[in-house]
Image: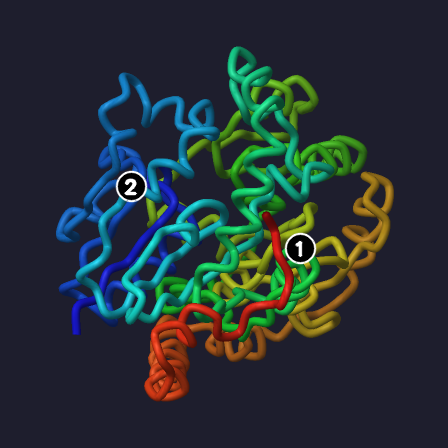
């Protein structure tokens, strides 16, 4: 069986890329097709992977300004020749689901979220798109939405990374999906006997992450906050930060593990698609303080692995931080909770789902393969 994997772009390394690597572990001989690949930003993670890029890779400075190229990704992915593969697995938050495959192939799409900048603009500001590219982006949005809706019909089966995302997929694309939580490398974390005096945020510095709530809450309480991550909103966030706020930028794995293990608590102020950071915190024996919405509702057990604040304000977050200081969290229960999201469990469940899809579709005609599981509506 010839297998290919497809991913939106490899220009950064985060939860979606970790999930892709676990999928590749199931199919270690499969090439990974992607629009752009920046080996420097991905570190050594993909050094042994056969990464194949689209024509966008030849655009000068493309990997550095990949968001400026948004209108061109549909054509780039449709240009990929995947006709010789029997199984195609796309890993996507946007474009990879739109590849064209053989009429007899099985295309399974692992969806981290419907395309955020097209359908969730209240959460994802255009500030992440370079200013010079914004007029072109705004002009292209109607056509991109039409293409995205059509692209979402192409996979034979969709797997969503959370119940939260499954509901978005149903609402936006009209598709049913199975749910499989993404893998979390819980084994790399472990509890530490001593706790530091700081709170921790680990996130890309994007507006929808609402990191300013954590900064303002810690400013008001006068408590230390360490922020791990980089992104377009860094300058704005630094302007809000008081003397107790430290921006750590990108840190290596050892520093990241220690920051988790010694934090008073890990703050998750945005609406997450899944909520990977609270699971990492639990694996390190530390609780999360999360906004009560989105994927965090699936990865945080209130009173056991963390607490929620229910109004998206710095005042509400600060009040919950004060209240959580009086709660006791059992590190053993935190670690046990995190173990349910291990990479091994992800691979076993993904293999079972794909096996089921192959059995379900094996008796269908090519035309049946291409229409299975799709809504009876037109997006033309």
Residues tagged 2 and 1 counted as in contact (Cβ below 8 A): no
Q: Is residue 200 left or right of residue 89?
A: right
Q: Secondary structure at mark 2?
A: loop
Query: x and y percent of residue 151 in the render?
Result: 48, 51
Q: Is residue 264 left or right of residue 185?
A: right
Query: x and y percent of residue 159 in the render?
Result: 49, 69
Q: Residue at x 52, y 65 (%)?
A: 161
The residue closer to the viewer here, 124 or 204, is: 124
Query: x and y percent of residue 70 in the render?
Result: 47, 30
Q: Is residue 21 left or right of residue 183?
A: left
The residue closer to the viewer here, 90 or 83, is: 83
- Label 2 neighbourhood size at 10 Å, few (<14), some (14-19), many (20+)? few
For the residues carrying marks 2 and 1, which lies nearer the camera in this image?
2
Res. 106 image quadrant: bottom left
Separation (CA) of disc 2 from disc 1: 25 Å
- Label 1 neighbourhood size at 10 Å, few (<14), some (14-19), many (20+)? some
Q: Residue at x 20, y 45 (%)?
A: 44
On-image quarter of the N terminus: bottom left
Q: How many marks?
A: 2
Instruction: Give the residue at mark 2.
Output: 79
The residue closer to the viewer here, 178 or 292, is: 178
Q: Residue at x 52, y 53 (%)?
A: 262
Instruction: Give the residue at mark 1.
Output: 172
């Amino acid at each position: 069986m010839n297998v290919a994997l497809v991913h939106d772009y490899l220009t950064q390394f985060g939860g979606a890329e970790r999930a892709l690597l676990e999928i590749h572990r199931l199919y270690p001989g499969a090439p990974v097709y992607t629009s752009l690949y920046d080996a420097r930003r991905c570190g050594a993670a993909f050094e042994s992977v056969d990464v194949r890029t689209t024509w966008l890779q030849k655009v000068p400075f493309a990997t550095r300004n990949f968001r400026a190229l948004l209108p061109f990704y549909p054509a780039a992915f449709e240009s990929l020749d995947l006709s010789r593969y029997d199984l195609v697995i796309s890993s996507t938050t946007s474009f990879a689901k739109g590849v064209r495959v053989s009429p007899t192939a099985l295309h399974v799409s692992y969806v981290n979220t419907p395309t955020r900048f097209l359908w969730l603009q209240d959460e994802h500001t255009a500030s992440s798109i370079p200013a010079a590219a914004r007029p072109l982006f705004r002009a292209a949005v109607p056509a991109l939405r039409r293409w995205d809706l059509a692209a979402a019909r192409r996979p034979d089966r969709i797997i969503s990374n959370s119940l939260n995302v499954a509901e978005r997929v149903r609402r936006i694309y009209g598709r049913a999906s199975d749910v499989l939580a993404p893998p979390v490398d819980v084994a790399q974390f472990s509890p530490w006997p001593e706790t530091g005096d700081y709170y921790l945020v680990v996130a890309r510095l994007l507006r929808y992450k609402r990191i300013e709530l954590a900064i303002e809450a810690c400013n008001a309480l006068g408590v230390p906050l360490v922020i791990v991550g980089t992104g377009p909103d860094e300058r704005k966030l630094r302007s809000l930060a008081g003397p107790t706020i430290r921006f750590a930028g990108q840190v290596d794995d050892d520093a990241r593990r220690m920051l988790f293990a010694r934090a008073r608590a890990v703050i998750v102020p945005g609406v997450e698609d899944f909520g990977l950071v609270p699971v990492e915190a639990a694996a390190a024996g530390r609780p999360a303080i999360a906004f009560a919405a989105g994927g965090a509702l699936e990865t945080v057990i209130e009173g056991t692995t963390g607490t929620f604040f229910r109004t998206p304000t710095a005042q509400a977050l600060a009040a919950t931080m004060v209240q959580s200081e009086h709660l006791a969290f059992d590190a053993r229960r935190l670690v046990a909770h995190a173990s349910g999201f291990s990479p091994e469990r992800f691979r076993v469940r993904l293999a079972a789902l794909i096996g089921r899809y192959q059995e379900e579709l094996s008796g269908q005609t090519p035309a049946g393969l291409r229409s299975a599981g799709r809504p009876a509506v037109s997006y033309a």
